């Protein structure tokens, strides 16, 4: 799965890489966690709440991490939908419409995963060898409250990150990894004219492990309260009998 990641790149680099409409106001984030408002890239002309959108350049908007289906009665369901399996998203009621019509890119510089061990879990940082930012495949949805009792609740735009089977690098760490969209396929992934999931299937596979690197980090990453550069520092692997389970200290893993 993908339950934590980081985004620290200079906003000017993100404008260039994602062809954004304007320079975003972003602060470095080293430990992004589910249910937070985080930046995603959407197609040109995608209009958010109270915004007519830009008709020529891609948008960068802040959405709630944890997709809330449009038909949901309670927005709390989003906490269970931070990830969607790419193999079944086209059939799942929560994701199938978004896969056809509401795809997004989720910028990142690194993501974190926990390797299961006899005595707990060892956290790892995974990133590109070239040090450049990349993008997860995301789906977004807009939830509008229904019924008189919900009239004062604001609409919520939310997203999920698609996952796939692990590549050679990730296989020893975890049995799933996020789908990473190649830079040359950004246009195709965001193209709203493509509504047949079969035409996107070739993108929903693990990226080559040779493009990535992974290294152990400290258990500091376990708590989302820790959001600083120390989260990315390499660390000695913890012993099996000293490994800590992030589930006990964090929001999600």
Image (cartoon, rainbow, N blue to C red):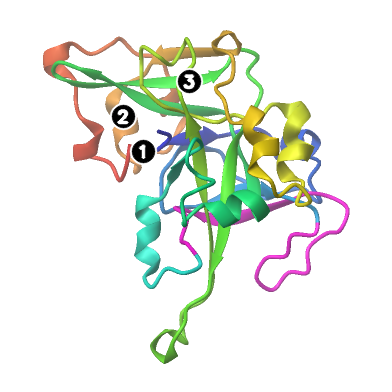
Q: Which residue is mark 2?
A: 220
Q: CA distance from mark 1 to mark 2?
A: 7 Å
Q: Residue at x 51, y 67 (%)?
A: 70
User: What residue is rendered at 51% in x and 39% in y?
Assistant: 162
CA–CA distance between discs 2 and 3? 16 Å
Looking at the picture, how far across and down is residue 81, in whole percent?
Answer: 41, 50
Please tell me how crowded label 3 is: few (under 14), some (14-19), or many (20+) other residues with Cα within 10 Å.
Answer: many
Q: What residue is at 47 percent from the left and 41 percent from the top? A: 88
Q: As displayed, is residue 33 above or below residue 180?
A: below
Q: Are marks 1 and 2 in contact (CB under 8 Å)?
A: yes
Q: How many marks?
A: 3
Q: For the view shown, which residue lies furthest in the right direction?
A: 56
Provide residue 213's location: percent of width, then percent of height: 51, 12
Give how far across and how far down residue 202 sits, in percent.
65, 28
How dense is the environment of label 2, judged by Cα within 10 Å: few (below 14), some, or many (20 and up)? some
Q: Give the foreground label among 1 and 3.
A: 3
**How dense is the environment of label 1, judged by Cα within 10 Å: few (below 14), some, or many (20 and up)?**
some
- SS at mark 3 in the image: strand
Q: Is residue 13 above or below residue 168?
A: below
Q: Nearer the viewer, residue 199 or 171?
A: 199
The residue labelled by disc 1 is 226
Q: Which residue is mark 3?
A: 126
The mark lying in front, picked from 2 and 3, is 3
Q: How far is the residue under mark 1 from the one under mark 3? A: 18 Å
């Amino acid at each position: 799965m993908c339950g934590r990641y980081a985004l620290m790149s200079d906003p000017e680099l993100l404008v260039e890489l994602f062809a954004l409409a304007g320079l975003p106001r972003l602060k470095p984030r080293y430990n992004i966690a589910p249910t937070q408002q985080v930046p995603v890239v959407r197609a040109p002309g995608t209009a958010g709440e109270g915004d007519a959108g830009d008709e020529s350049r891609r948008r960068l908007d802040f959405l709630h991490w944890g997709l809330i289906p449009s038909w949901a009665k309670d927005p709390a369901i989003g906490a269970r939908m931070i990830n969607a399996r790419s193999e079944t998203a086209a059939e799942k009621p929560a994701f199938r419409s978004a896969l056809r019509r509401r795809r997004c890119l989720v910028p990142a510089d690194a993501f974190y995963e926990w390797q299961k061990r006899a005595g707990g879990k060892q956290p790892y940082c995974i990133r590109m060898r070239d040090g450049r930012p990349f993008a997860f495949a995301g789906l977004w949805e807009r939830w509008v409250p229904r019924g008189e009792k919900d009239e004062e609740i604001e609409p919520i735009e939310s997203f999920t990150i698609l996952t796939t089977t692990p590549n050679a690098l990730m296989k020893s760490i975890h049995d799933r990894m996020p789908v990473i969209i190649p830079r040359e396929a950004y246009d195709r992934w965001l193209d709203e004219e493509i509504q047949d999931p079969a035409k996107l299937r070739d993108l929903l596979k693990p990226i080559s492990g040779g493009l990535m690197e992974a290294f152990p980090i400290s258990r500091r990453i376990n708590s989302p309260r820790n959001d600083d550069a120390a989260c990315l520092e390499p660390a000695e692997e913890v012993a099996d009998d000293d490994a800590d389970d992030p589930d006990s200290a964090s929001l999600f893993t």
